[in-house]
Image (cartoon, grey):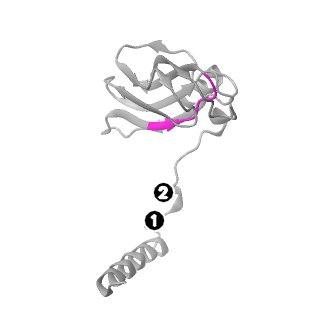
Amino acid sequence: MKRRSFLKGTLAGSTVAIAASAGLLAPSQVLAAWPKAAFEAKNIQDAIKGVAGTDATVASADIKIKAPDIAENGAVVPVTVSSTIAGAESIAIVIAKNGTPLAANFKLSSLAKGYVSTRVKMGKTSDVIAVVKAGGKVYSAKKEVKVTIGGCGG
């Protein structure tokens, strides 16, 4: 190990330790909120209600889902959701036929673009539903993804 790398690492670690002990880095500020009931929901309506407060959604063409038409492996399915709806507060990804439908939930800051990209597990061929909460309203879009090899226990 080079001396310069060692000193940089030591300095960075010391800075974080001092900030944490001074109360500048509180764990409550660092940890994300987790909607436990929504992630444990067994049906689509309960999952959406858990993240958006209501299960009533309006279909929107302003939400685009980029996912493969056919996923060769359900264990790793890339999904990208983009929204041009102004003031997007959160984006959730729901997989209709999974045992627990809510696959991901992203809270967005007021300055963030309505764009998320992740990989999800899919047990079988199903609709991928994107749910965007903006301005107190809940919007959705869906796309069917065919799965050839199951990822959720398949």
Measure how far apart labels 2 and 1 are at the Cα level: 7 Å
Residue 76 left/right relative to 150: left
Q: Name the disc covering residue 25, or none.
A: 1
Provide residue 31's location: percent of width, then percent of height: 52, 54
* Residue 22 in sight here: yes
> Amino acid type of disc 2?
Val
At a point 53% along the width and 56% down the height, the residue shown is 28
Relative to 116, residue 19 above or below: below
* Residue 8 coordinates in the image, percent (x, y): 33, 79
Measuring from the top left, give residue 100's x and y in whole percent.
66, 31
Whether residue 122 is in magenta: the answer is yes
Q: Residue furthest bottom?
A: 3
Q: Which mark is residue 119?
A: none
- Is the residue under label 1 in contact with that under label 2 (CB below 8 Å)? yes
The residue stretch that appears in magenta? 118-124
Q: Give whichever of 77, 81 is nearer the camera.
A: 77
